[in-house]
């Protein structure tokens, strides 16, 4: 069974990655490393595994690494794992710049290892089925996707997240979810336009191949009346809305289990949600960022 180590000890690592690894039927939870050893030790104890003081010691003990760290930290840590031949389960976005993301993908290609990008909407079983149905049905001329939360407006587990406090954080945090779904159903995205509306929400207009188009709305600081999580498609076959999943209460766990299965067995083929796809999403994020200004760091 594949031995997987966890890198990270913050909320997402504690509530999704660690319990997912501990309860997985696909992999063995081999240990935890984090910059704060005391937090790594606490997390490891909670799941009956070991904490590592040295990152290289963790790498020596595993076949793969699951990362739950910010996008500015992930590339350098992932590259060290990749260069030792370890498979990687990456968070989105895969990096905070095209340069570091591109180098990450080159390293993966050279090492010939598996990579999976944890895009919850593509991995959750119910949403995966709905997205697959929408893609198979086809005939869609337009799509609309709204992901507006109040995560950074009210007290939440992510209130202390530095990178999510940046002006365009909603783009980098929620944009990968939006673009991944729209790309999968509507086809490759060949152009984007991004702007900020009067409420501060980021609005995106995407052009797909065959001149299909989609519209997105993203916010981490939505007012209560503006909170939304909806995706719909319109075309010659009528109208289709994807089901809504509560990722804060079990949905993320189901998606993570599927991602681990993909990492260990490549169940949906070698290119499903891999780093190459993550890089395509990163290019779209950067194009939008250039139009909006002030990239995260």
Image: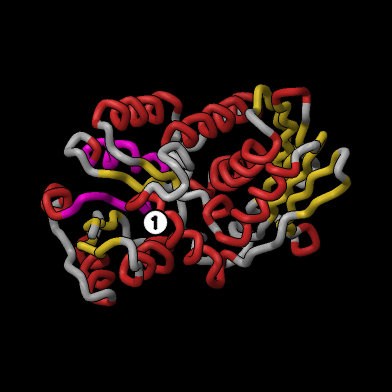
Q: Residue at x 29, y 41 (%)?
A: 78
Q: Residue at x 40, y 30 (%)?
A: 101
Residue at the disc numbered 1? 261
Q: Which residues, given as a range, are shown in magenta?
A: 62-81
Q: Quadrant of residue 246?
A: bottom right
Closer to the camera, 225 or 243? 243
Asked which secondary structure carries label 1, the reply is: helix
The answer to whether 54 appears left or right of 81 in the picture is left
Label 1 crowd (10 A; few <14 / some 14-19 / many >=20) = some
Quarter occupied by the C terminus: top left
Q: Residue at x 66, y 58 (%)?
A: 149
Question: Was residue 79 drawn as part of the magenta stretch in this picture?
Answer: yes
The answer to whether 168 appears left or right of 252 in the picture is right
Tell how many labels. Answer: 1
Question: Was residue 115 drawn as part of the magenta stretch in this picture?
Answer: no
In the displayed structure, 271 sits above or below 89; it is above
Q: Residue at x 75, y 32 (%)?
A: 205
């Amino acid at each position: 069974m594949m031995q997987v180590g966890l890198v990270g000890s913050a909320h997402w690592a504690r509530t999704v990655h660690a319990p997912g690894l501990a309860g997985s039927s696909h992999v063995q939870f081999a240990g935890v490393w984090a910059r704060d050893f005391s937090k790594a030790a606490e997390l490891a104890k909670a799941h009956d595994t070991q904490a590592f003081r040295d990152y290289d010691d963790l790498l020596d003990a595993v076949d793969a690494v699951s990362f739950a760290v910010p996008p500015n930290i992930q590339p350098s840590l992932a590259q060290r794992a990749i260069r030792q031949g370890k498979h990687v389960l990456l968070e989105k976005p895969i990096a905070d710049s095209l340069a570091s993301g591109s180098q990450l993908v080159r390293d993966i290609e050279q090492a010939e290892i598996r990579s999976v990008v944890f895009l919850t909407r593509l991995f959750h079983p119910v949403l995966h089925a709905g997205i697959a149905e929408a893609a198979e049905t086809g005939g869609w001329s337009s799509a609309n996707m709204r992901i507006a939360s109040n995560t950074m407006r009210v007290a939440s587990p992510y209130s202390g997240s530095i990178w999510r406090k940046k002006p365009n954080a909603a783009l980098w945090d929620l944009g990968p979810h939006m673009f991944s779904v729209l790309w999968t159903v509507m086809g490759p995205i060949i152009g984007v336009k991004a702007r900020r509306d009067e409420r501060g929400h980021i609005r995106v207009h995407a052009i797909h191949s065959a001149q299909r188009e989609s519209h997105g709305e993203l916010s981490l600081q939505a007012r209560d009346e503006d909170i939304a999580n909806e995706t719909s498609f319109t075309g010659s076959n009528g109208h289709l809305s994807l089901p809504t999943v509560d990722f804060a209460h079990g949905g993320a766990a189901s998606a993570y289990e599927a991602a681990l299965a993909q990492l260990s067995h490549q169940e949906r083929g070698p290119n499903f949600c891999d780093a190459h796809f993550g890089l395509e999403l990163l290019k779209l994020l950067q194009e939008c960022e250039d139009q909006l200004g002030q990239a995260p760091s």
